[in-house]
Amino acid sequence: MVFDKIQVNGSEIEAEGRFRIEDETVHVSTTSEDVGLAFKQVETTNAPVQLVLYKGDTDRYSSEGLTLKHYTVAGGEFKMELEK
């Protein structure tokens, strides 16, 4: 699925990207450096993640207490994997 706005621990960022949900894992990818920076801060602090993904004004996914398991940057694309 796609999103055009993301909220990470209360910080809302206008950014396009994709996400998919597999069991208890959420995969998020985007080319937005702002989103990449937000997740880099999470990786540094190892803080639990509150994540909300929107398309327009519609909340497509929302969860609290997620753990960032993987954070990678490849070819200008930021990829994050979060688990409940």
Image (cartoon, rainbow, N blue to C red):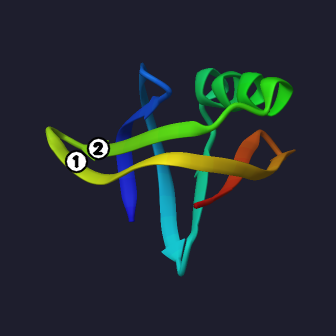
The quadrant in which residue 69 appears is: bottom right
Residue 70 horizontal/vertical position (percent):
81, 53
Q: Nearer the viewer, residue 19 or 43?
A: 43
The local secondary structure at tag 1 comes to: strand
The quadrant in which residue 30 appears is: top right
Q: Nearer the viewer, residue 36 or 43?
A: 43
Q: Is residue 9 left or right of 29 when viewed as pictured?
A: left
Write the residue at 72% across / 45% down. Answer: 77
Residue carrying label 1: 59
Q: Is residue 66 left or right of 56 when viewed as pictured?
A: right
Query: Is disc 2 in contact with disc 1, using a CB cutoff of under 8 Å?
Result: yes
> Where's the C terminus, which quadrant?
bottom right
- Check the image and name the residue furthest to the left: 57
The amino acid beneath tag 2 is Tyr
Q: Nearer the viewer, residue 26 or 36?
A: 26
Residue 9 horizontal/vertical position (percent):
50, 26
Label 2, residues with CA under 10 Å away: few <14, some 14-19, many ≥20 = some
Q: Is residue 14 above or below residue 21?
A: above
Q: Is residue 51 above or below residue 80?
A: above
